[in-house]
Image: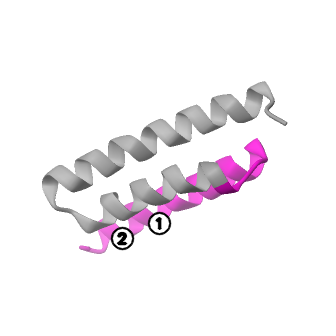
């Protein structure tokens, strides 16, 4: 059920999610807060490391675009 690639990908994306969540909570910024929660939560839903990485990269790109647009 758990392979090494999934565990490593989950660790990386989950850690980034926790970092964004803490940053968003301390700064009062809704985009990093929500993005961090989504990055943490997606690790519980998706069980394929490749799809997990694609979705996580998409979430990071979306957060970047929203912050760039002024949100």
Magenta stretch?
45-71
Residue at figure coordinates x 79%, y 47% from the top left = 48
Measured in 3D between alpha carbons, the distance from the residue under mark 1 to the one under mark 2, in whole angstroms, is 6 Å
Residue 24 highlighted magenta (yes or no): no
The quarter of the picture where residue 7 lies is: top right
Element class at badge 2: helix
Instruction: Answer above or below: position of 71 versus 9.
Output: below
Which residue is pictured at 74% across the width and 53% down the height?
51
- At x 39%, y 60%, the residue is 64
Mark 1 near mark 2, Cβ–Cβ under 8 Å?
Answer: yes
Q: Quadrant of residue 35?
A: bottom left
Please, which colouring scheme is shown? one colour
Say the numbered circle drawn on residue 2. Answer: none
Q: Nearer the viewer, residue 35 or 57?
A: 35
Quarter location, residue 69 = bottom left
Tell me the quadrant of the picture where the C terminus can be found: bottom left
Q: Please identify the quadrant where the N terminus is shown.
A: top right
Q: Is residue 15 left or right of residue 29?
A: right
51, above or below 1, in the image:
below
- The circle on residue 62 is 1
User: Which residue is the extreme one toward the right?
Assistant: 1
Give coordinates of residue 66: x percent, y percent.
Answer: 36, 70
Q: Position of residue 31 (x, y in %)?
A: 32, 65
The prevailing secondary structure element of the residues shown in magenta is helix
Mark 2 packing: few (<14 Cα in 10 Å), some, or many (20+)? few
Q: Is residue 37 left or right of residue 13?
A: left
How crowded pointer 1 is (Cα within 10 Å; few <14, some 14-19, many 20+) is rated as: some
Location of residue 26 in the rendering, given as x and y in whole percent from the top left corner: 16, 50
Q: Which residue extends farthest top?
A: 4
Q: Mark 2 sits on what residue?
A: 66
Residue 45, image x, y percentages: 67, 56
In the image, taking residue 64 as reference, residue 55 lies left or right, namely right
């Amino acid at each position: 059920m758990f392979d090494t690639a999934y565990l490593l990908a989950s660790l990386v994306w989950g850690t980034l999610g926790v970092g964004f969540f803490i940053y968003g909570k301390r700064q009062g910024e809704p985009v990093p807060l929500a993005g961090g929660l989504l990055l943490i939560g997606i690790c519980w839903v998706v069980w394929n490391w490749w799809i997990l990485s694609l979705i996580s990269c998409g979430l990071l790109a979306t957060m970047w675009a929203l912050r760039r647009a002024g949100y």
